[in-house]
Amino acid sequence: MSLPLRIRLTLPRDSFRLHVDLELAGQGITGLFGESGSGKTSLLRCIAGLEKVGDGHIEVGGETWLDTDAGIDRSPHERSLAYVFQEPRLFPHLSVERNLHFAAKRADSSGVSFDHVVELLSLKRLLQRNATQLSGGEAKRVAIARALLRSPSLLLMDEPLSSLDAGKQRELLPYLDRLQADLTVPVIYVSHSIDEITQLSDQLVVLASGEVQAVGPLQDVLLRTDIELLGGAEAGVILETERKDYDDQHRLTRLQFSGGDLWVSADVVSARPRVRIRANDVSLCKTRPVHTSILNIVPVVVEEITADGDASVLVEVRAGSDHMLARITRRSLRELGVAVGSQLFAQIKSVAVRNSAVSL
């Protein structure tokens, strides 16, 4: 088990105050989610030693990087981290290969190998290109590879997809997804996109006005619909599923989760795909529907009901050991007689599978 990351700090300013107290897992991807101006980049810069902290303690992998009480404040180059900025920041006069070797020469020899990183990010055909000849997505992949080759104890990623169009973002997401599976270095990933965060993260930190609103496993935090950023039209959950089979005749893939099967209109390649289901795409029925175009119907038990504006409510239901959200009107709630403990059926109209929207 990797040692946890402990981050406690206060960044006092006249116009903005950042105050956080976090203990994060020392492995996997932690999503740092919040609107512009919430303090996400400021927090990363404090961790990296690029901002002066008024009071705090930062400990990564058992090493203390900052302890204001003890007078410890390691400079950025003394902290075993790599930072992927919004812009790639490659050396424009060097080839891709020389950009990568520049980082590798300054790394601990016990870290990830050059060949492994090149293969992980599919860079072999780009090695002899000059950095100025790369597309935006290619340059981002090289920047990530360069960061990994420094063999950091912590990888910080500050909205690495923000400057890319939607097509380039879709191309890069699978590479970011592989970081979680192939590498042990913990990652803090900043984004204001809930789709990016839910695609990649294992745990989630929600930041607003410099304060932590929620922190914990991704699935648990997504159920915090009392937090404005996690409610509204984007309210939803993540399910970890297993690919079972593919119906070639109807072009449907059957995924299985603890509550039953999901049929999706895509040929899903991953053996254990992650799916996102929005509350707006879930309806509730007292009896199992028999004449419906919706393929996915699973038995559920109502766990909680919360207000959601003047006309609707959010209903948290349990399907097997997993949880989902359904947004229904107050009139439907009353007419169906929905209450905590009610046994119902959920119709799931659509999901997103690894960032590709599919209809059910």
Image: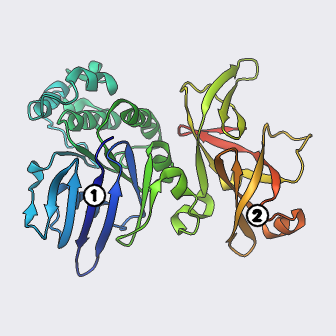
Q: Nearer the viewer, residue 33 or 100?
A: 33
> Depth check: 21 or 163 in front?
21
Horizontal and vertical percent for residue 181? 40, 32
- Percent x, y of residue 3: 28, 47
Q: How is the image coloured?
A: rainbow
> Where residue 103 sits in the image (x, y, percent)?
14, 34
Which residue occupies 24% across, 20% down? Answer: 115
Question: Which numbered disc flags the more N-terminal residue, 1 or 2?
Answer: 1
In the image, taking residue 34 as reference, residue 322 lies left or right, namely: right
Residue lying at the far front in this picture: please name it: 1
Q: Is residue 218 above or below residue 179?
A: below
Q: Residues within 10 Å of mark 2 (few under 14, many from 20)?
A: few
Name the residue beneath numbered marker 2: 340
The mark found on residue 242 in the picture is none
Q: Element at badge 1? A: strand
Q: Amino acid at mark 2?
A: Val
Mark 1 surroundings: few (<14), some (14-19) or many (≥20) residues within 10 A: some
Quarter holding the N terminus? top left
Report the number of numbered marks. 2
Q: Residue at the spot x=35%, y=68% of the render?
A: 37
Residue 226 vertical position relative to residue 144 in the rendered view, above or below: below
Task: Please state which amino acid type lies under the numbered disc 1.
Answer: Arg
360 relative position to 79: left or right: right
Question: Alpha carbon of mark 1 to alpha carbon of mark 2: how far?
Answer: 38 Å
- Which type of secondary structure does the marked residue at label 2 adopt? loop
| Residue in the foreground of this view, choosing between 50 and 287 | 287
Residue for point 32% across, 38% down: 136
Q: Which mark is residue 6?
A: 1
List the single residue furthest toward the bottom.
Answer: 14
Q: Position of residue 278 (x, y in %)?
A: 64, 52
Residue lying at 57% horizontally and 69% vertically, measured from the top left:
226
